[in-house]
Amino acid sequence: MHAMILAAGRGERMRPLTDACPKPLLEVGGKPLIVWHIERLAAAGVTDLVINHAWLGHLVEQRLGDGSQWGVRIQYSPETMALETAGGIAHALPLLGNAPFLVVNGDIFTDYDFGRLQPVLADMARNPQRTGHLVLMPKADYPTGRDLAIDPAGFAKVSEAGDVPMTFAGVAAYAPAFFADVPRNAPSPLLPHFLHAMSAQHMTAEVFSGQWLDVGTVERLTTANELVRVAGR
């Protein structure tokens, strides 16, 4: 089973911390944010990882190496230009294999159990019409992008009047077919592809109500460190 950790962002809102340190290597509880993901993926039995990078990417490779210290195998997908999320994943497809895979935003802090997605991946492999699955969260008290919802049949949709609006948590499962029309070497945002898959009812979703934080600002990095301190981890 493969997983991709998205780590190519410049981290503009985290400056000046990210002027000399790539955002995935900013520390939470004494270890890089991205290492929390690596450890949780390894604990869930996901040991083949792909990490994309751009800004200061050589430091990411130096710090994480081949992943053997965490019992995983890491391959890297360098980007010489900003490919955005869908473009970055499409660019990395040759490293991800032919089966459905997980994708995790490198700048979130969460206790989500990635093992929950193993049956989802198996079901996606059996059903070619299911090309994506999103983990959604109750809305945060800060901007997080387009509001989404889940219909009675379990499919993801754009939130409408009467729905309980939710936020994409930055954790998802995809079949390679989801990215069939995404150019591999050009910028491409994820939202238009979400909207297309949702309109065709090719994308399911689940709700997660555990610990989750978008570590997109210096203030929320401080909050993440406080969460670790309180938990005694």
Image (spheres, rainbow, N blue to C red):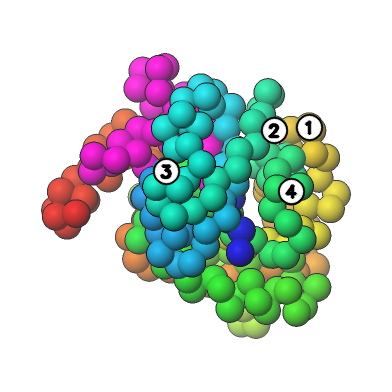
Q: CA gap, disc 3 to disc 1?
A: 25 Å
Q: CA gap, disc 1 to disc 4?
A: 14 Å
Judge from the rendering whether residue 15 lies leftward or rightward of residue 54; answer left or right: left
Q: Which residues are magenta?
A: 5-33
The residue at the far bottom in this view is: 153
Local secondary structure at mark 1: loop
Residue 186 bears which disc, if any? 1
At label 3, the amino acid type is: Ile
Residues under numbered marks 4 and 3 in contact, where contact means CB atoms less than 8 Å apart: no
- Residue 14: horizontal and vertical position, in percent? 39, 27
The residue at the far right in this view is: 181
Marked residue nearer the N-terminal end (1 or 4):
4
Residues under numbered marks 3 and 2 in contact, where contact means CB atoms less than 8 Å apart: no
Is the residue marked by circle 2 packed among few (<14), some (14-19), or many (20+) residues within 10 Å? many
Residue 93 bears which disc, if any? 4
Foreground residue, 47 or 187? 47
Q: Quadrant of residue 224?
A: top left
Mark 2 lies on residue: 83
Point out the frontmost of discs 3 and 2: 3
